[in-house]
Amino acid sequence: MRALNQLAGIVEAELRALAREAGVFIFVVFFPFMFSLLTYGAGQALTGGEASPTQWFYQLIGFTIMMIALTMSSSSAWYFRRGMMTGRLEYIFAAPVSPLTAVLSSALTSVIFNIASFIVVAAIGVIAVYGPYYLVNVIGVILFLALALLPVIGFNLLVGILTIFFREPEPVTNLINAVVSSVSGFTYPIILLPNFLQILGQVMPYSHIVNGARDILAGSFKYVQLSPHLFLLGYLIIGLIVFRVGEITYVRKSGVHW
Amino acid sequence: MSAIACEDLKKYYRVKVRRSFFNRIDSVIKALDGVSLEVEKGVVFSLVGPNGAGKTTMVKILSTLLLPDAGWAQVGGYDVVRQAGRVRRIIGLVLAPDKGFYARLTGLENLVYYGRLYGLSKGEATRKAKELLELTGLGEDGMRLFEEYSLGMRAKLSIAKALINDPEIVFLDEPTIGLDPLSARRIRNLIKDLAAKGMTIFMTSHNMWEVENLSNTVAVLKSGKVVAKGSPSELKERLKLTYRVEVEVISEKTPDTSLPVITGERGYPVVTVTTDKPSEDLVKVIDEMRSKGYSIGMVRVQEPSLEEVLTQVLSS
């Protein structure tokens, strides 16, 4: 109960702080529209006006999930970095709260924030391409994302613990984000990639998330598509284990107590 | 049982010293080198010393943020390494008065956040936060965003944060650093109030006047070692620091004496004596002047300051 109360307290504070930085939310919502319209426009120009609106929708959802993937992969890393810079991290460690609770709270905040931005983008996209009747599918995607983003929290923890060791999140997050955005099929089908990159794309959760989200919104999702997500939950378990091992190693190496 | 106790506490930092682009050598900085201390319950204890003496390291070990390399420390009777969780429940901490808060949250929201970290329910945390905003004099300013706060207000909020869990012991690392005189005075009054309520305060400061006025006990830390400890008056006595006795003589002419004479603020001659026995010498000077028929005006005995104590201890 105590941990849940702490978790709720941190999530509430983080969400309140985020809500007062409207620019971040506007950017996350605006970015997919800008880039999907650019690529769709380019497609229209190249095909002589034959690109279908569903192609734009494909790009729109792809860019939205890409934003979610990029922010979620690095949210813990930035939580640590911001905490170090503002002195908040020391106060958290000086309080009777587990670092895992603090990091999971930050990841959960990221999930809530990203799902909120996805709802806005997907609702506009669905209405524009499929009509208001398909809006009900947005609810399905929210439920789907709540499950499918759990493995990403595992990724998040892995990157977070690396930041504790290296202090600067950029080198780690930039590398991971470059790989994730290239092989996850956000804006093109991964079958266009060489085999080894396709495999890399399949073993990470993002390609399954983006394809699942697109299919649910278009009404063509099959329940069998959920099965990879159950296996991908392994990332969450691995993330939790590595975070614990990293914690112990960090304490032993640095003499910092948490 | 003492509020804080530690024995032979050591903390070394291993750093790399860059001699040239390719040449780096390992070096060890002894932040704490065998510190033993005991702090009684309900007192204001100050740790003073130059920059890099190990004051912040000491605070961080006692507040469970750093692990010592050797020795032991207890806070509230709990071991800071093995019972860190228990220690964290009974302490409050201010490391830097302007840090640790969400810029885009109000003072109240920040305090509620910290209250919940200490396991208070949202309702309890809000009630306690409002109480502390009143106590620290922030009141209605608690509804303003932290980023709009002045440094003085931030310092007050830091102290409020440190009190959110009703701690038995509060650690304050330079609580008035960078504050204007008025804000610093408010913080000092707040510390006095907390001490009057029986809370144990462990603070560090470079402001010797502040330390002298607030502390029951002072320890001087130099290169990771405690080199002097006692109440401010004990330290002055032990170091045999000199007092300056000034006796103003109501006369137009310089009095006939072998002692040094200066012209005072009111234009009269002032006989001055530098001594380690102020009471005896004061009586002697007054007797001598009276015996020569002079009237005595103002009398002043200037006590040595704690700053002089620190200067003498550190330079010896």
Image (cartoon, grey):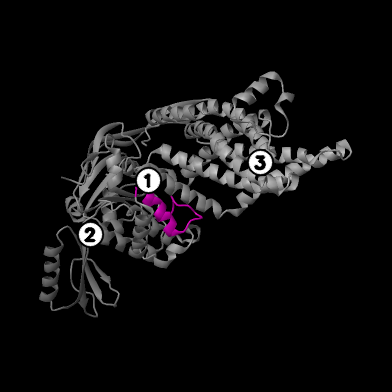
Q: Distance between the residues labelled 1 and 2?
A: 31 Å
Quarter of the image where one finds residue A139: top right
Q: Residues within 10 Å of mark 3 (few under 14, many from 20)?
A: many
Amino acid on which the number 3 mark rests in the picture:
Thr
| The magenta stretch spans residue B316 | no
| Residue B104 in view of the camera | yes
Outermost residue, right side: A48
Give A158 or A62, whichever is nearer the viewer: A62
Name the residue located 18 percent from the left edge and 69 percent from the top edge: B257
Q: Distance between the residues labelled 2 and 3?
A: 56 Å
Q: Residue A64 carries which label?
A: 3
Name the residue located 71 percent from the left edge and 41 percent from the top edge: A60
Amino acid on which the number 1 mark rests in the picture:
Asn
Give A88 or B185, whichever is nearer the viewer: A88
Residue B274, image x, y percentages: 21, 61
Range covered by the magenta-colored residues = B98-119
* Marks 1 & 3 on one chain: no
Q: Name the residue under label 2.
A: B197
Q: Name the residue under label 1.
A: B51
Q: Which mark is residue B183?
A: none
Amino acid on which the number 2 mark rests in the picture:
Lys
